[in-house]
Image (cartoon, grey):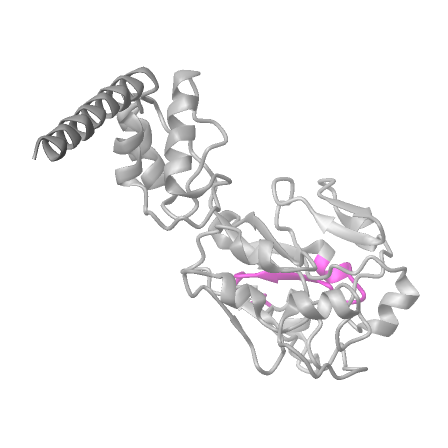
Amino acid sequence: MNVILIAVIVLGGIGLVAALILFLAGKKFAVHEDERIAKVAEVLPQANCGGCGFPGCSGFAGACVKAADKGSLEGLLCPVGGQAVMEQVADILGMKAEASAPKVAVVRCNGTCESRPRVAEFDGAQSCKVQQMLGSGETACAFGCLGCGDCVAACQFDAIRMNPETGLPEVDEEKCTACGACSKACPRGIIEIRLKGLKNRRVVVLCNNKDKGAQTRKACSVGCIACQKCVKVCKFEAITVDANLAHIDAEKCKLCRKCEDECPQHAIQAFNFPPRKPKAEEAQSPTSPTPNPSPVREGE
């Protein structure tokens, strides 16, 4: 009986000593989290999409608090919550939210099934990433959309779908939060997060092909051939050609659409514009054919 009692006392003493050591260690090495982080996290959408550039909403909340201590929230944006959420965050941190222009995902490829016919058949896993690792895909264009829908699977907001007729992804601008998940999922980098533009209107080069003109034309009938006609016609220096590919700076573009008219490949297209009115001389001429109106698209 005495042996059992002694064992209980010894074990109890060891437990008390261990508990005391743990208590003192917890006090010494305790990490005190700023209570503002929890408050900021509460107003965030908790989508944990990573579109802000941080590991989840808690990581973004911590970054906001650190930035506030430095006096500015510049460069920080929750793409899901948008400006409304950032205003709440700024209010919690006692700061003023800087206005940010809304953005949207843009698919920079117009190589439909008709303009970019198949030259091979891939009988394997339906994954853009897999096809990219194994070769150039089913078409002759090594830069265009692979059409397997990795971007669709990556989107948490049901904002992108594959068009079965064109074989290309289409973005629903009303649902898109510009989180960038689809852009990261695309192994060819054809999905770009761009400014939505005034009244959601944009002029975009729908091509990602960096081959020389002759080779691009063989692979796709609507690919950019780097002829630089768009550069010459733009008065605002909004277009540059680099690596045999034209690109339009959304911040410089004035939406005049002259580049769209000038492009011989129809690789430049305008979105969400009203149909164009016929020219005065064409309208007065009864024999002049009626021009096709500019397409109004919901997304790219």
Left or right of residue 148: residue 26: left
Q: How many marks can you see? A: 0
**Chief secondary structure of the magenta portion:** loop
At x 76%, y 63%, the residue is 143
At x 39%, y 21%, the residue is 68
Relative to 281, is 211 above or below? Answer: above
Relative to 173, is 37 above or below? Answer: above
Which of 241/234 is in front? 241
Left or right of residue 38: residue 234: right
Which of 110/154 is in front? 154
User: How far across and down, in percent of the image, does residue 5 sit?
Assistant: 10, 31
In the rendered structure, does residue 254 fall within the stretch colored magenta? no
Which of 127/177 is in front? 127
At x 14%, y 32%, the residue is 3
User: How far across and down, in percent of the image, does residue 83 sit?
Assistant: 37, 40
At x 52%, y 67%, the residue is 152
User: How far across and down, in percent of the image, does residue 118 sit?
Assistant: 77, 82
| Residue 110 visible in the current orientation | no
Q: Which residue lies furthest to the left in this view?
A: 1
In the rendered structure, does residue 266 fall within the stretch colored magenta? yes
What's drawn in magenta, residue-wise?
260-277
> Quadrant location of the C terminus?
bottom right
Where, by quadrant of the figure, is residue 287 drawn?
bottom right
Left or right of residue 43: residue 204: right
Where, by quadrant of the figure, is residue 208 drawn?
bottom right
User: How far across and down, in percent of the image, does residue 45 sit?
Assistant: 32, 47
> Quadrant location of the N terminus?
top left
Where, by quadrant of the figure, is residue 127 drawn?
bottom right
Relative to 106, is 40 above or below? Answer: above
